[in-house]
Image: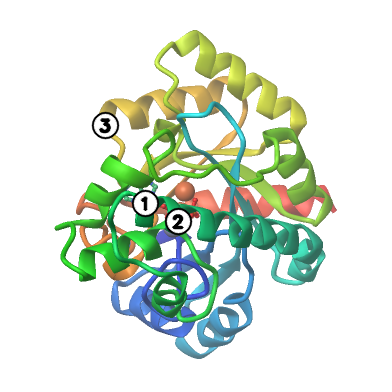
Amino acid sequence: MDKFIDLHTHSTASDGTMTPSELVRHAKEAGLSALALTDHDTTDGIDEALEEGKKSGVEVIAGVEINVDFTPDSEMHLLGYFFEDNYKNLEPLLKRLKASREERNPKMIKKLNELGFDISLEEVRREAKDKLVGRPHIASVLVKKGYFKKISDVFNKYISAGRPAYVKREKLLPKEAIEEIVRCGGIPVLAHPIYISLTAMAELRALIHELRGYGLKGIEAFYSDNTPYDTILFLKLAIEYNLIPTGGSDFHGDLKPHIMLGTGRGDLHVPYKILEKLKELAKRKD
Ligand code: AMP
Ligand code: ZN
Ligand code: FE
Ligand code: FE
């Protein structure tokens, strides 16, 4: 039987709604052979996920997702994999990123208050269960209070880059993030390239070439929100730039209710073979 995996997931340690152990058990139920935990800017869920992985017989990969600075109106995210034995190396960087969120959050709440929304930082912190606060937690509070129907409506109208309540936070440059992931013993992969909002192919090629030069090793070619055309394009780019095409759902539980673990919107299938390729690369590095 073919084995399938999911290399992009979030737990309650960041903005997912399942605890790391619930997530691993859910992967088991969904029939996945392996799961990477890739919380935003935190490795706090890793110990629990690794432990549950041993109990449930699911191979757990310790990862992280880091948002980096690119153009003002687009999102570039990097994934890092294989921090099982060395995720503590990431601590100084993650501390800095956490501080940048703590500086941003009250500013966003203030803007939302000025725009007429009744929302406080305490409510948002509670929504994040006193763990890392992300914009989806802010959105979730506004949905629960009845201002919006869906989380994505809050993003589209108010909190996406360039919208009225958005506040930019300090982020690493792509080069710094890639080099830091490598320095800490991880394998850097470009997440969901569709969100980079590069319309010109020439620009996307130039970008991937540049990131490859900094040490990028993979590109997330299989992703929940891709069209089949996107997937083919990213697979082609992976071949062209000698990158491993990876894949994952970006599962967040109830915060992205339309995305299922492993299968995304229903048709995502990431073969185990991809993980084998990543592992070969991780070994070759030592
Ligand atoms: P932050 O970590 O605070 O920058 O927030 C990033 C999170 O917001 C990620 O989980 C994204 O998936 C989510 N996100 C970004 N844009 C949107 C959107 N338009 N709709 C829903 N979620 C989004
Ligand atoms: Zn998220
Ligand atoms: Fe992301
Ligand atoms: Fe993600």
Residue 9 horizontal side relative to residue 92, left or right: left
Task: Depth check: give the residue in front, 112 or 144.
Answer: 112
| SS type, badge 2 | helix
The reply to whether residue 207 is visible in this rendering is yes
Q: Kindly report the distance in space between the C-alpha atoms of the residues bearing marks 2 and 3.
A: 41 Å
State yes or no: discs 1 and 2 in contact (Cβ < 8 Å): yes
Residue 1 horizontal side relative to residue 76, left or right: left
Residue 51 in picture, x, y percent from top left = 58, 87
Closer mark to the observer between disc 2 and disc 3: 2
Q: What residue is pinned by disc 2?
A: 110
- How is colour applied across the structure in the image? rainbow
Q: What residue is pinned by disc 3?
A: 228
Q: Kindly report the distance in space between the C-alpha atoms of the residues bearing marks 3 and 1.
A: 42 Å
Location of residue 279 by image quarter = bottom right
Q: What residue is pinned by disc 1?
A: 114
Mark 1 belongs to which amino acid? Glu
Residue in view at x 76 percent, y 39 percent: 176
